[in-house]
Amino acid sequence: MKNKPIILVTGAAGQLGVSLQEEAKNHPHYQWHFYKRKDLDITKPDEVERVLEELRPTFCINTAAYTNVKQAEFEKQEARLVNVTAAAHLAKICAYYNTQLIHLSTDYVFDGAQAHPYTEDDRPQPVNHYGKTKAEGEALVLAESENHYVVRTAWLYASTHGHNFYRSILNKATAGESLQVVNDQVGTPTSTTQLCAYLLRLIEKQPPGGIYHCAGETIQSWYGFAKDILKAHQLEVPLEEIRTPSTEVKRPRFSALSTTKRF
């Protein structure tokens, strides 16, 4: 056991954390440690230092984040604490213990003003508080070590668990509800299965530190994604395309991620 590379996963109760626990069964050559928030709250420096000192992990996959885009506008300090302050401290402690951090980020660091997929080299320019905290967190993580990774993903969903668009559409349609879905936000839906495989490949290949994108290949609107979900499950319910309400938190209209950077 002691010779196995150690992988620490934070935020293990989230949809990606749960998916990684499933994926870990296929990779017994690693020693996995999954920490839910009650076991490791990354906003508490003492807890972070205690766990890192005890485990001395080879890698740390940080899936812990404040992700409620709407609520972030009202809980700005809380969002900043998790996505910026805690992420930076985690990156610093990981660097101290020679642990490579893999920090998850988002397409929401971009403003959506361009009409072609965003690359890792495009300059972040977020349009809401959530996006701003994630962009700032990215920069601080990378500043702590040239070996750390930031992995941006987009419109993440697990088909079997968690609270996400895929399961919300599926549950409503199964119950026979009619659906109204926005057609003026475009992105790249990404399954946790795809992201888990990507993260494991990153660990195995160990390319140079920096920013990487992992996203689905299909560029579509939420409405288009909903149509695909209904088709895949052979469900037929009324589906209406609508525009994003003006009262909504501002979101990027086009946030598809380019995945041409290979390793």
Image (spheres, rainbow, N blue to C red):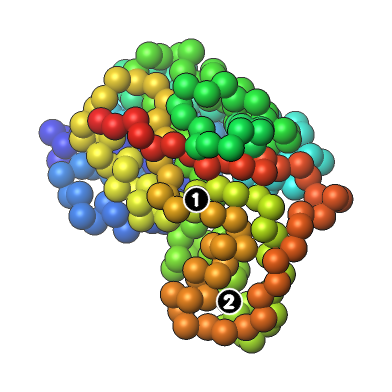
Which residue is painted at 15% across and 40% down in the image?
1
Placement of 100 over or under 173, stated as above or below: above
**Location of mark 1 (residue):** 219
Q: Is residue 135 left or right of residue 262?
A: right
Q: Is mark 1 on a helix, strand or loop?
A: loop
Q: Which of the 4 image quadrants contains residue 126?
A: top right
Q: Mark 1 or mark 2, which is nearer to you?
A: 1
Is 174 or 23 nearer to us in this picture?
174
Looking at this rendering, what residue extends furthest in the right direction? 247
Q: Is residue 24 left or right of residue 232?
A: left
Q: Which of 132 and 61 is in front in this view?
A: 132
**Residue 48 or residue 79, whichever sits in front:** 79
The quarter of the picture where the C terminus appears is top left
Marks 1/2: CA–CA distance: 23 Å
Q: Is residue 28 visible?
A: yes
Mark 1 is on which residue type? Answer: Ile
Q: Residue tagged by mark 2?
A: 171
Q: Which amino acid does label 2 sit on?
A: Asn
Where is residue 151, by image quadrant? top left
Instruction: Rate crowding at label 1 as few (under 14), some (14 to 19) or many (20 or more) other CA atoms within 10 Å.
Output: some
Q: N-terminal of the two: label 1 or label 2?
A: 2
Residue at the spot x=36%, y=55% of the render? Answer: 193
The residue under the point 52% across, 42% down is 256
In the orientation shown, which residue stands out farthest toward the front? 115
Does 209 sit left or right of 182 as displayed? left
Residue 88: percent from left, percent from top: 54, 21
Q: Residue 116 in the image: x percent, y percent? A: 53, 36
Mark 2: which secondary structure? helix
Q: Is residue 13 visible?
A: no
x, y (%) of residue 12? Answer: 45, 49
